[in-house]
Image (cartoon, rainbow, N blue to C red):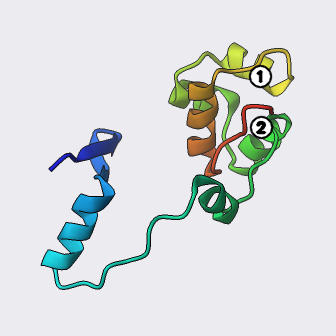
Amino acid sequence: MDIQIISRDGAPEYAVLPWDQYQALLKAAGQQHSSPPPSSSTAQAACEPVLRPLADLRGLREAKGLAVETLARTVGISPSYLGLIERGERQPDAAIRRSLAWELGVAGWRDES
């Protein structure tokens, strides 16, 4: 099987495998075949909370009760760089946006934000 394991804090959290192998596992387990996965736009539309612009970063962080230093260190950037992002003086790359979204419990930000 071609399985990708995704870990968080050193512990396995998700297993990703090709659709046909997933279907074979369902069949072997006696489960009914499920419908094909939704398109990424459909899946993204169903995510809660709704995607927010990067301008809401400070509000999201404060709503979670996180200090700038805590969130910055968790995503692997300096607190001063996070401050620049929150003030709109810097645009983080996609990896940092995804990390921020993960830590703040949102689906992520679109590239245009």
Q: Is residue 5 left or right of residue 30?
A: right
**Amino acid type of disc 1?**
Ile
Cα–Cα span, label 2 and label 1: 8 Å
Q: Is residue 34 above or below residue 102?
A: below
Q: Position of residue 56 (x, y in %)?
A: 83, 41
Mark 1: secondary structure: helix
Look at the numbered disc 2 and give the secondary structure of its residue.
helix
Query: What residue is shown at x 86% (from left), y 22% (from top)?
Result: 88
Classify residue 46 by image quadrant.
Answer: bottom right
Q: In which quadrant of the rendered view does residue 55 lie?
A: top right
Q: Nearer the viewer, residue 43 or 73?
A: 43
Image location of residue 32, percent across then percent down: 29, 85
Identified at 72% across, 32% down, the residue is 111
In this image, 88 relative to 42: left or right? right
Mark 1, Cα crowd under 10 Å, few <14 / some 14-19 / many 20+, is some
Q: Which residue is mark 2?
A: 57
Give the number of the disc on residue 36: none
Instruction: Please tell me which residue is depicted at 57% across the width and 58% down the height of the picture.
Output: 39
For residue 85, the mark is: 1
- Front residue of 31/109: it is 31
Instruction: Give the mark, 2 or 1, whose residue is nearer the N terminus.
Output: 2
Is residue 28 toward the left or the right of residue 113 in the image?
A: left
Quadrant for the C terminus, please: top right
- At a point 26% along the width and 64% down the height, the residue shown is 22
- Give coordinates of residue 96: x percent, y percent: 60, 26
| Closer to us: 32 or 67 | 32
Circles 2 and 1 in contact, beta carbons < 8 Å = yes
87 lies above or below 70: above
Callout 2 amino acid = Leu
